[in-house]
Amino acid sequence: MTEFVMFLPVFVLIFVGIFELGRLYDFSLRARGMAFTDTISRFRQVQDTSFRDAITSNGLARKAISPLSASVDSTSQLFRTPPNQRAGVREVLAQRDLKAYSQTSGLGQHGSLGEALGRINLARQAGVEVTAVDHMITHDLTLFVGPSALASELFDDRPQNRLDTSMSGQGDSLLQTLANKVNETITSAGARSALAANIRYGTLTGRFDNSVHIASVGDVEVSAWYSVLAPTYAHSDDRKNGQMATFASRLTIEGNNHKPYRDILAFRTNPELPILPDEYEVPNPADEDLQDHFELPLNYGDDFY
């Protein structure tokens, strides 16, 4: 009995400590769950917002459609919420992301190639051998699309202060002048890929902060956060995606820089299509020997290679 009375306070302290540690662990789990929920909410907000709605908003989706705004926002997130890994790994990951989202050498100035090169350069500096297409990546887009000015215009998502796309030529129509102005805006923001291919840039970080009162300790801050890459916009109707890609390509060709393409492709407001039956020459399937067409899988065979 004497020993029980002597050690009772110790047992009480142990039990209280275990209870408080359990409460702290429970709050930390809740914080992780809430942070994850916030991250998914931000993810869905970008994924469900079209380019048109994004540019008229002032939220996450608008920041994600331009490499420059995404790089600034992602760098800010990185400083507020550094990687959760242990010190050594955390420093490596933080440096990797800083290079990837840099406004001078990464995403902010060189678009997608700058982001990729920022990640790869850290591995190169560490002596890691990169393979496949990774070892080819530079800031030079022509390495992938060739010397075509139109291809560069379509795929280049570097933010640029270019004025040549908006300089009107003599005899330009109102539609072409407007197209040049829109082209200038899209090019200067590096947002052509966001418009045509629904690409979104940067990262999204969900966070939750709370405090829990622990006996004999006081209030303990509990925080958790997660970071994910911004998703592409996902339209429920695939036809809309094709229409936006067609619109962006058509708009690019309409610019003064690409008049030869516009003339060759002969875009017209009212296309001249054949309207009489005798203007069409459509084969009758009943007169065709289908066996000749399907003896081999479509597009395969010696001629294909």
Image (cartoon, helix red, strand yellow):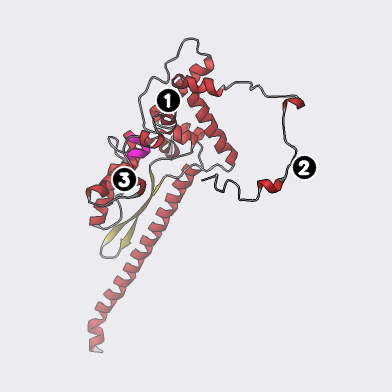
The answer to whether residue 57 shows anywhere in this view is no
Q: Position of residue 147 (x, y in %)?
A: 39, 29
Q: Residue at x 45, y 47 (%)?
A: 43
Q: Are marks 1 and 2 in contact (CB under 8 Å)?
A: no
- Residue type (three-letter) at the residue carrying disc 1: Thr
Q: CA distance from mark 1 to mark 3?
A: 33 Å
Q: Quadrant of residue 242?
A: top right
- Residue type (three-letter) at the residue carrying disc 3: His
Q: Residue at x 50, y 29 (%)?
A: 249
For the residue carrying disc 1, how many other residues have a C-alpha within 10 Å: few (<14), some (14-19), or many (20+)?
A: many
User: Dot 1 corresponds to which residue?
Assistant: 185
What segment is highlighted magenta in the picture? 110-114
Examine the residues drawn in magenta and state their main secondary structure. Answer: helix
Q: Position of residue 121 (x, y in %)?
A: 27, 45
Q: Position of residue 182 (x, y in %)?
A: 46, 23
Q: Is residue 27 above or below residue 154?
A: below
Q: CA distance from mark 1 to mark 2?
A: 53 Å
Q: Position of residue 268 (x, y in %)?
A: 59, 21
Q: Secondary structure at mark 1?
A: helix
Q: Quadrant of the N terminus?
A: bottom left
Q: Secondary structure at mark 2?
A: helix
Q: Is residue 232 magenta?
A: no
The dot on residue 135 is 3
User: Dot 2 corresponds to which residue?
Assistant: 286
